[in-house]
Image (cartoon, grey):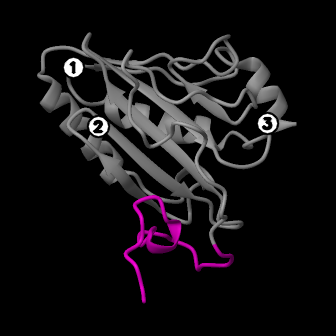
Amino acid sequence: MLLPLAASDPAAAFENRITPKRNSPSDAQPYEGVGEGPTADGKLAKCSGAPNCFSSFAKGKNLYYPPWQYTGKSKAEAFADIEAVIKAYKPGQSGIDGGGFKIAKRTDNYVWVQFESAENAYIDDLEIALTEDGRAAVRSGSREGYLDFAVNARRINALAKALGERPGWTTTQITKATNLAYFIKNMS
């Protein structure tokens, strides 16, 4: 008897891939708390501490990424902007996510997206949650390995750039100046 696939089952995902499927998706599960949405205090899942994750709640400069900020729009309008930017994301941009992506979970203030690498079918998780103070907390992390070869930085930067071009949004880029240790480890 076949059962319906769970939202986090990558075998049913990634119809927007741009590369031929080469490997089966990894069976690695999301880091603890990923996909559950914000906690009661508004936080997203933690990063493991490896230089393969960024979070608006990370401790220390290496993995910290500031929340995006919005003004002049309702929470629903802000979330619509985020969802539009995600849906317009192009797999393969900056040489990443050629395996495609899918929205695994969505509420009125939270979205969890799974991205797949082209070569090894590794899955990365992106979470975005709107807070009550006009901000969007962000977490993007790899499920496997220690390094990510700057994939999470490039993904966040592409989404932040697209969102920052919309009225009322302020976003930042992850650069060597803001996260030097991350780039030294991932680019050497």
Residue bearing the label numbered 3: 186
The amino acid type found where label 1 is placed reads: Gly
What x and y, as percent, mark residue 15?
A: 41, 73
Number of other residues with Cα within 10 Å of mark 2, as a class: few under 14, some 14 to 19, many 20 or more: many
Give left or right: position of 35 versus 76. right
Region in magenta: 1-24
Residue bearing the label numbered 2: 82
Which residue, as the protein is rendered here, is positioned at the far front? 1
**Between residues 37 and 103, which one lies in front from this camera angle?**
37
Give left or right: position of 108 versus 106. left
Residue at (72%, 43%) from the top-left corner?
A: 148
Which residue, as the protein is rendered here, is positioned at the far right? 188
Q: Which mark is residue 168?
A: 1
The residues bearing labels 1 and 2 have C-alpha atoms spaced at a distance of: 12 Å
The answer to the question of whether label 1 and label 3 lie on touching residues, with beta carbons closer than 8 A, is: no
Q: Earlier in the sequence, mark 1 or mark 3?
A: 1
